[in-house]
C-alpha cells in the first residue's frame, strides 16, 4: 500500500522555511522538503482579513510519520496556529515512492508519532 503523503506548512520568513526543512530532513522524518516563495496569502484571522507574504514548505514523507512531523514543525514554527496539512500522494513512480519510504526513519520519534494521529 502506498503510504506516501505531502505535508505543507507556511511561514513568514525564508529563514524559518529553511530551518524547518533542514530540521525535518536531518531528523529523517521526511525524505525532502521543497521551499517555495514568496507567495501572497490572504486569510481571515481573529475576525480580520489579513494579507502577508509567506514561504511554503512541502515535505514528502509517510502517513505514519505525520504526528512526529507535526510535532517537529510546531517546535520550530512562529505562528500561533500554523497551517500543517497533509495530502495523500495518490500515485507516483515506484522508485520515487520507495525512495521516500527508504528515507524516513521513525525509530527515534515514537512518542511524538503517538501524540498526534493522522486518520
Image: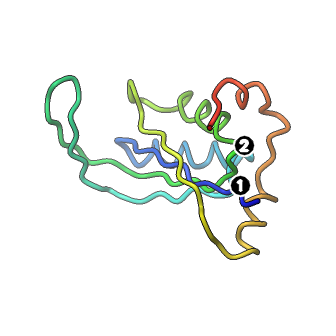
| Residue tagged 1 | 3
Residue toward you, 50 or 117:
117
Would residue 118 be found to the left or right of residue 113 on screen?
A: left
Looking at the image, do the residues carrying marks 2 and 1 touch, with CB atoms under 8 Å apart? Answer: yes
Q: How is the image coloured?
A: rainbow
Looking at the image, the residue that sits furthest to the right is 107
Q: Tell me the tag on residue 82.
A: none
Residue matched to label 2 = 64
Question: What is the x, y in percent for residue 72?
Answer: 61, 33
Q: Quadrant of the C terminus?
A: top right
Q: Residue at x 64, y 72 (%)?
A: 92
Q: CA distance from mark 2 to mark 1?
A: 8 Å
Which residue is located at x 72 percent, y 43 percent?
64
**Relative to 20, is 43 on the left or the right?**
left
Q: Is residue 24 left or right of residue 42?
A: right
Query: In the rendered image, which quarter contains the N terminus?
Result: bottom right
The furthest residue to the left:
48
Residue 82: x %, y % from top left? 42, 33
Q: Secondary structure at mark 2?
A: helix
Amino acid at each position: 500500500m502506498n503510504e506516501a503523503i505531502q505535508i505543507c506548512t507556511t511561514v513568514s520568513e525564508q529563514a524559518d522555511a529553511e530551518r524547518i526543512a533542514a530540521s525535518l530532513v536531518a531528523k529523517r522524518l521526511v525524505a525532502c522538503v521543497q521551499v517555495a516563495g514568496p507567495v501572497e496569502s490572504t486569510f481571515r484571522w481573529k475576525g480580520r482579513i489579513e494579507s502577508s507574504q509567506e514561504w511554503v514548505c512541502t515535505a514528502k514523507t509517510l502517513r505514519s510519520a505525520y504526528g512526529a512531523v507535526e510535532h517537529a514543525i510546531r517546535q520550530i514554527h512562529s505562528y500561533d496556529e500554523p497551517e500543517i496539512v497533509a495530502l495523500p500522494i495518490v500515485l507516483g513512480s515506484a522508485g520515487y515512492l520507495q525512495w521516500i519510504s527508504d528515507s524516513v526513519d521513525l525509530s527515534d520519534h515514537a512518542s511524538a508519532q503517538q501524540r498526534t494521529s493522522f486518520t
